[in-house]
Image: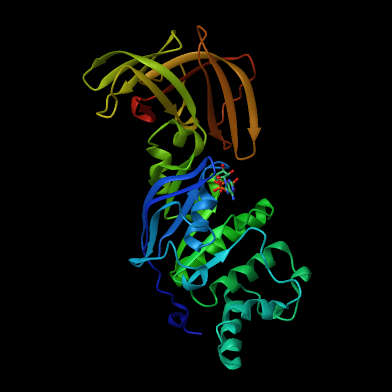
Amino acid sequence: MRKKDLQITGATIRIERLSKTFDEVVAVDNVSLEVEKGEFMTFLGPSGSGKTTILNMIAGFERPTGGDIYVNGRSIGYIPPFKRDIGMVFQNYALFPHMTVYENIAFPLTTRKLSKDEIRTKVQEALTLVKLQQYGDRYPKQLSGGQQQRIALARAMIFKPPVLLMDEPLGALDKKLREHMQLEIKHLHEELGFTIIYVTHDQSEALTMSDRVVVLNAGKIDQVGSPGELYDKPRNKFVADFIGETNLFEGKILNREGDIISIETNGVVRIQGLQQEEIKGERVSISLRPEKIVFLNDAEERQNIYSGTLKDIVYVGETTKFYIALEGGGEEIFLKLQNRKGVPKLSRGDTVRIGWDIDDMTIFS
Ligand code: ATP
């Protein structure tokens, strides 16, 4: 099979001032977004943030209250689902139990009235793509969860839709299988080239798979960016806290001297930070990733240095987390070390010296 037979031309998607209200609930609030051709875009957010509602409006299962959606520049927000040329994969597979795997995958083609030969070729091609060539005669209940989800994927891809929507497709699988399928879907996407919009509430899944991630919060977009941008340059406290783990402090700016600002948190702890244009006013929040903090010996220096007492040590496989109460009362902080040679041997109650540099933190007004 030549690769170019499999190529799909993805589509651009433009979402413009899209809103959806259910009675009193504003599920989606004036959302605008551009998705590039062939992009893997993920909607990430807590339960109820509006992810599924946006996806359903793109698929055509919900009618917008306001705004519109354009695929390759064509307005689709108010036309029936079957006229949209969009594939969809759900969490609960939605396979037909009384049909074999072959019949399930062929279904979108039989309704499109293709010849038997064409259908056979395409179903074989789709089964090969999801590595289930030998399973055409089985029924869904004779397959594992991961295999059923591959069949659902093959069925969604078979008419080569330029856009594929996926709503928590791996939600029902165990962790190992989920991680395996994440890579499979990512590779299929790279190989085939359709535009994918993917919904998940699992941040590690979003970071693993996506070109860009949309962080949704209460029906609005908080930030859109590559996984690296969201992690290293979160725009606000919500994003910093939702993506990865972090230490969050509230503070007050005491003074500004050149590049350095001095922040007081909790009335006792002084932290030196990097002055940036975005930091306005006196009240700020600070996000400090736990892996940026280091244990220091007496001779080592950093721009911020504190001593504290170890409150807890939590072993989590590849890393260990250390919870530290800073001297003088006030903040509790946690730091994280990779479990490799050289991790300091510490016990609860030990006094430790820790530190980090001013550019290790993100400061928000
Ligand atoms: P989850 O991760 O839990 O699936 P989500 O981010 O996908 O959440 P949505 O399902 O889009 O969130 O729901 C957004 C808001 O809209 C929620 O407050 C939800 O209760 C409400 N909602 C969604 N569908 C309906 C409906 N058919 N009728 C009334 N309210 C709805």
- Report x, y in % for residue 109: 57, 82
Q: Is residue 110 above or below residue 176?
A: below
Q: Is residue 51 above or below residue 149?
A: above
Q: Quadrant of residue 103?
A: bottom right
The residue closer to the viewer here, 278 or 106, is 106
- Residue 299: in sight, yes or no? no
The residue closer to the viewer here, 360 or 276, is 276
- Residue 251: in sight, yes or no? yes
- Report x, y in % for residue 195: 43, 65
The residue lying furthest to the right in this view is 142
The mark total stands at 0
Q: Is residue 320 above or below residue 60?
A: above
Q: Is residue 203 left or right of residue 35?
A: right
Q: Which residue shows up at 43% across the image and 69% down it?
A: 193
- Report x, y in % for residue 361: 39, 28
The residue closer to the viewer here, 143 or 348, is 143
Q: Is residue 271 above or below residue 320?
A: above
Q: Quadrant of residue 251?
A: top left
The residue closer to the viewer here, 177 or 48, is 48
